Amino acid sequence: MKNPEIVELQEDVSNSPLYSEDLAPVPASKRTWNKWDLAAIWVGMAVCIPTYLLASYMIKSGLSWLEALMIIIIGNIIITVPMVLNGHAGVKYGVPFPVIGRASFGTVGIHIASVVRGIVACGWFGIQTWIGGLAFYAIWNALTGADGATALDVGKFIGFGLFWLVNVYFIWNGTESIKWLEKFSAPILILLGILLIAWGIYGAKGFGIVLQQSDQLAKQTAILNTIDDKVTLTFNPIRDKAGNIKASDYQLIVPTTQGKTNTTDWLPTSRGLENIDVKTFVPNLDSESIKEGTKNINVRFRIPSNGNYKTSSEVTVTVAKNAGETFGERIWSYLLWLTAMVGFWATMAISIADITRYTNAQKNQVQGQFIGLPGTMALYSFVGIFVTCAAVINFGDVLVAEDAPWDPVSLLARFENPVVVVIAQIFMLIATLSTNIAANVIAPANAFSNLAPRAISFRTGGLITAVIGILICPWWLMDEISGLLLFVSSFLGPVLGILIADYFMINKKEVNQAHLFKTNGIYAFGGSGFNKAAMLALLAGVIVAIIGLLVPSLSFLYTLSWFTGFGVAFVVYILLMKKVTV
C-alpha cells in the first residue's frame, strides 16, 4: 500500500553524476526508524559533557538553578521547531540535507553550506575522539594503578587511536549500525543520569537540601569593595548542610606599594568574613592599583584533614557581579543565554534531514524529536545541576565554588575506588561515542559524498571525516578549535533560514525530486548551479552578524547572530525569490 506521506522517485536518474545509492531517496520499504529510534538518537547526542556543563555555566553567571533549567527547556523547545520543520523534507522525499538543499542553493551552491557544516562536524569529531581516548587512558590507569600524566604521553595517544578505531567500525558498517548504537546507548545513558541523582540524594540524605546548595554556587567566593582609599573584602566560602563554614582558615595574597606580593598568615574564618579591612593585615597595600584593576588580591582557604590541611585553589577577588542589575539587564541576560542554548544544536537543525529520511511518517519525526531533544537536554542539565550541588555536601574538601566538580571528568577524578572509576569511564565512553557518531559523522559523510557522488560513498565520506579528525591535532588545539567552531557555527543560522523559507514559503513543500539529481534541471539555475537569491540571502545574514562583531554599539547583532542571521536570510530570500521564476 502506497504511503501518502512519501514521494517515491519515478524517473531513472541513476546515470547522473549527482546520483549515488547513498544520496538517493530511501524507499518506503527500507525506512526502518520509528519515533523511539529518533528519540534514542537524540538521547545519544544530547548526553555529553557540554550538556552537563550548560546549567553550571549559567549558575556561575548568577542565575538560579530553576532559571537555568527553564532557559534550557525553552531554548530546546525553540530549536526543536525548526528542527522538525527542516526534517519534513527528509521524511517526504527521503534525501539527505546536501540533496534537498540543492533546491534552494543550487546543485553547486549547496556545497558552500554543506561543506562548512561538515567541516564544523569534523572539528568536533576530533575533539570528541580525543575525549573518548582519555576515558580509555583513565581505565588503563585505574586497572594498573598507574598515575595519569598531565602532559601528553604515549598512553593518551594509544587511547585516542583505540577510540578512533571504534568510531571507524560504526562508520564502516553504516547507518543501521548507528541506529543500533543509539538504541543500545539511550537506556544506559538515562540510567546513568538516574544513578547520579540517586548518588547525590544518598550522600546528602535528601533531595531538597541538595538543590538549596545552588545558592552557594551562584554566589561570588570573594567580593572586592572600594570606598575612597579603603579596600574591604567579603568572602562566601562553601558551607556544610548545617550552614557552617567548612574552611577553618583563609590566607590573602596581596600586592604592596613596593611592587611585591605579601602573603598573610592563615587567619581564622571564625573572626568574620564580611567587610574585612585589608590594611589591617597589610598596611602597605597597593590600593590604587587594585582600584584601577591593574593588580589583584587573591585568597585561598584550608581545612584540617588527617593531621594535615587540604587547601583550596586560589580565588581572585573581584567586584560584585550583577550589582544593581536592572530588570532590563536581567532580561537581556536571559536572552543571551537563550541564544547560546538555541545555537547549541543549530548545526543539527540544518542537516536533520540526514536522519529523518529513515522514517516513514511525519508524526515519527515530530514526536521522536520532541521526546528526545528537549526531554534529554532538560534531564541531563538537571543532572549536572543536581550532582554539582550534591558534591558541595558530599565532598568535605570542596571549600569554594570554583573547586566544585562542575564537569563529569572532575567528578570522576574524586573517586578513588578503581571499580567505580572503570564503570564510570565506560559510561563516559558510551556517551561520547553515541554523540560523536550521530552528531559528527552522518552530516560530514553526506557532505563529502555530495562533492563527488560517483566517487565518494557515505562510508568513504565518513572515513574522510575520521582522518580530518586526526589531522586537526585536537590534543594540541582543543581549546582553540572549539572556540573557532563555535564562531563558525554562529554564522549557520542564515543557512537554516534559507532552507525553511524555500521549502515552506516558496515551494510550498513541493520539490521536483528527479530534478534534484539533474545537472541541467531547474535546480541548476540556468546552468551555473548557483541560486543567486540564496547566495545573496546567505551573504546578507552573515554580514549582519559581522557588523555586530565589528561595531561595538551593534554587538547585539553578533551576540544574537543565530536569530538575526536566520531572520535576515529568511526575509531576503523570500523577497528575492518572489522576483524569480524557478
Image (tube, helix red, strand yellow):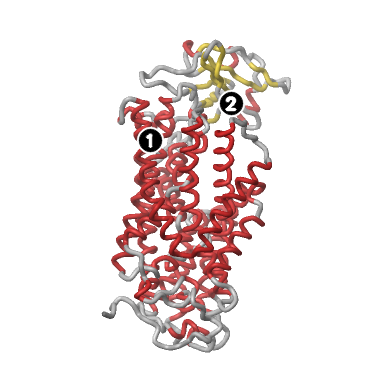
Q: In this orientation, which residue lies closer to the viewer: 97 or 320? A: 97
The vertical placement of 364 against 202, above or below, is below
Residue at 43% across, 27% down: 392
| Earlier-in-chain disc, 2 versus 1 | 2
Residue at 48% across, 43% down: 428
Percent x, y of residue 179: 41, 60
Q: In this orientation, which residue lies closer to the viewer: 532 or 258? A: 532
- Give the amino acid type for the residue marked by disc 1 in the picture: Phe
The vertical placement of 215 against 181, above or below, is above
Residue at 44% across, 31% down: 217
Q: In this orientation, which residue lies closer to the viewer: 421 or 316? A: 421
| Secondary structure state at the residue bearing disc 2 | loop
Residue 505 in which image quadrant:
bottom left
Residue 561 visible to an observer of this rendering = yes
- Density class for disc 2 (Cα within 10 Å; few <14, some 14-19, many ≥20) is some
The vertical placement of 297 against 406, above or below, is above
Q: Are marks 2 and 1 in contact (CB under 8 Å)?
A: no
Residue furthest out toward the front: 144
Q: Nearer the viewer, mark 2 or mark 1?
A: 1
Percent x, y of residue 539: 55, 70
Image-based side of 477 in relation to 364, left or right = right
| Residue on which the image places disc 2 | 314
| Residue on which the image places disc 1 | 386
Residue 208 in which image quadrant:
top left
- Density class for disc 1 (Cα within 10 Å; few <14, some 14-19, many ≥20) is many
- Give the amino acid type for the residue marked by disc 2 in the picture: Glu
What is the count of numbered marks? 2
Between marks 2 and 1, how big is the CA–CA gap? 25 Å
